[in-house]
């Protein structure tokens, strides 16, 4: 049921964002409702974290960082997927709106990715004694971060122009193509992993699973709202740089 | 002119340029020499330790040396304004990418041989136990670096802060190359075995990026 | 209560800060862009 809620949220927000990107300035009003949903979900999630989720035996309260670290995974990948989708769309149609979707997805994706990289060590230090460990998931997340920060750099250095957008789209595609290989490569290089094993395989107590799920759903809606706002900014900037007559 | 012919023409042109001016190749060779010589001074002297580090070191040196070469991959075109001519070629532009990448590949293979020799001289590395494996890793590594590097070099032509941007774009994407190649090299030198999956993943990676380069180069040339 | 609660609070606080901070930054950029536009027209 939790999985269903997460998947539904992803599909709903994805559909909404694709619809929104086609005419951001006219449709941005809908973001208000999405924001409201996010604002409702957040306290629910926090409430679950504090009152519903049990205190884990071995790690104590520290384990509760779990509920803010794991949910950030989905927006991270969601954002980078949007960047790839936008990139392909732009290369195919040369319509700037796809590119706006791409940059918005990438930027918000980087925000959530950075969050993962900040919160991970906050957990690792008290739990394992080190701020950073070169384990599979953390390392792959770091590589992901590098790829998308590079993507943002490329965009900013290349002066907003069709060339820059094309190049960025290509790099976005190259980036996402590289990810499975990076994952495999890091796994190979490590040999072992210190990361707590995948919760679903461990048979997590249901309260924990539900709390994580609630976090995921909440973050997805927050993510969607942020992407929408970023899209709005992109559309506004496009408008100011090239004032258009009425009609697209 | 057919596609493969254009690729061959581009490749030949680049190779001739490289061999005649000796700029690119010379700089890469000297750079590799400098780095290896420096490393050999402060590398651990115990043979076992050095052997443990050699594969990783080798590929880091190759990475930075290639970077030098890649930055110049499109230099002749930009300088002579030849890009406009290339664009007019009535053929699938992906072949131009293959020609360019091919020239880079050959240059990189040369650099690898040179660097391997340097490692033997300065760091006492004996390549014979794992010659086949190291050669295989070298080949696949060069192909991968050439494919990804040529594409990214093209993407960053004329972009600000290119000396910063190109490495930043390149390094995360080539991490798999470095890992696969150094693992295979390590296994070769140490007499270990590498899972077949690694070779498959390596070859697949090269294939994927060669394809990406081939298909998107159309978009890249419109600049 | 577990004295490691400090770490947990730090984690959540940072999350809030980052997300709110980013949202604010977007808003500021939006204002700046609109202002620029008004100046031009």
Image (tube, coloured by chain):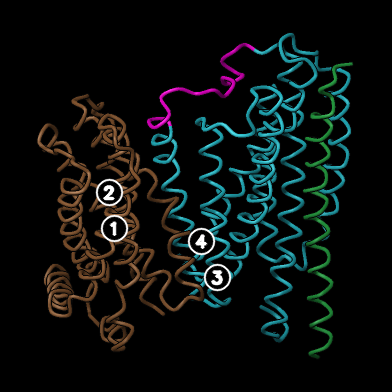
Chain colours: A cyan, B brown, C green
Marks 1,2: beta carbons within 8 A: yes
Residue located 44% across and 79% down the image = B158
Marks 3,4: beta carbons within 8 A: yes
Answer few, some or many: residues within 10 Å of disc 2's Cα (few below 14, many 20 plus, some between 14 and 19).
Answer: many
Q: CA distance from mark 1 to mark 4?
A: 24 Å
Q: Which mark is residue A89?
A: 4
Q: CA distance from mark 3 to mark 1?
A: 28 Å
- The residue range painted magenta reads A187-203
Label 4, secondary structure: give it.
Answer: helix
Report whether mark 1 lies on the same chain as mark 2: yes
Which of label 3 and label 1 is nearer to you?
A: 1
Residue located 63% across and 54% down the image = A105
Marks 3,1: beta carbons within 8 A: no
Q: Which mark is residue A95?
A: 3
Q: Which mark is residue B206?
A: 2
Subunit under mark 1: B
């Amino acid at each position: 049921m939790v999985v269903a809620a997460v998947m539904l949220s992803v599909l709903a927000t994805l559909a909404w964002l694709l619809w929104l990107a086609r005419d951001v300035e006219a449709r941005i009003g809908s973001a208000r409702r999405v924001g409201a949903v996010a604002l409702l979900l957040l306290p629910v999630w926090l409430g679950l974290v504090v009152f519903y989720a049990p205190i884990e035996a071995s790690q104590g309260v520290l384990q509760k960082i779990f509920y803010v670290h794991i949910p950030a995974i989905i927006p991270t990948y969601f954002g980078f997927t949007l960047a790839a989708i936008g990139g392909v769309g732009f290369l195919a149609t040369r319509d700037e709106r796809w590119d706006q979707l791409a940059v918005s997805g990438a930027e918000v994706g980087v925000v959530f990715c950075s969050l993962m990289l900040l919160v991970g060590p906050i957990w690792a230090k008290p739990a394992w004694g080190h701020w950073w460990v070169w384990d599979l998931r953390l390392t792959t997340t770091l590589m992901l971060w590098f790829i998308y920060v590079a993507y943002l750099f490329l965009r900013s250095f290349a002066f907003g122009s069709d060339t820059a957008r094309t190049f960025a789209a290509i790099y976005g595609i190259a980036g996402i193509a590289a990810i499975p290989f990076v994952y495999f490569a890091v796994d190979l290089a490590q040999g072992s992993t210190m990361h707590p094993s995948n919760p679903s395989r461990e048979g997590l107590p249901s309260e924990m699973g539900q709390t994580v799920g609630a976090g995921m759903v909440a973050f997805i809606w927050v993510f969607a709202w942020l992407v929408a706002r970023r899209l709005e900014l992109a559309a506004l900037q496009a408008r100011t740089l090239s004032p258009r007559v009425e009609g697209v | 002119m057919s596609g493969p012919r254009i690729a061959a023409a581009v490749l030949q042109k680049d190779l001739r340029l490289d061999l005649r001016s000796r700029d690119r190749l010379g700089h890469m060779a000297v750079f590799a020499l400098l780095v290896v010589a420096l490393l050999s001074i402060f590398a651990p002297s115990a043979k076992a330790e050095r052997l443990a580090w050699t594969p990783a070191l080798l590929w880091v040196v190759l990475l930075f040396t290639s970077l030098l070469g890649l930055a110049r991959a499109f230099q002749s075109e930009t300088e002579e304004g030849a890009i406009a001519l290339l664009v007019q070629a009535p053929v699938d532009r992906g072949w131009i990418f293959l020609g360019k990448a091919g020239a880079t590949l050959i240059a990189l293979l040369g650099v690898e041989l040179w660097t391997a020799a340097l490692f033997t001289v300065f760091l006492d590395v004996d390549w014979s136990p794992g010659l086949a494996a190291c050669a295989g890793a070298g080949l696949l590594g060069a192909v991968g670096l050439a494919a990804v590097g040529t594409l990214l070099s093209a993407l960053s032509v004329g972009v600000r802060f290119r000396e910063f941007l190109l490495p930043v774009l390149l390094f995360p994407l080539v991490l798999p190359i470095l890992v696969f190649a150094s693992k295979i090299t390590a296994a070769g030198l140490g007499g270990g075995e590498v899972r077949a999956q690694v070779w498959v993943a390596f070859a697949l990676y090269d294939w994927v990026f060669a394809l990406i380069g081939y298909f998107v180069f159309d978009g890249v040339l419109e600049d | 209560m577990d004295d490691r609660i400090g770490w947990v609070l730090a984690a959540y606080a940072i999350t809030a800060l980052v997300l709110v901070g980013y949202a604010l930054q977007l808003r500021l950029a939006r204002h700046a862009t609109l202002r620029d536009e008004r100046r031009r027209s």
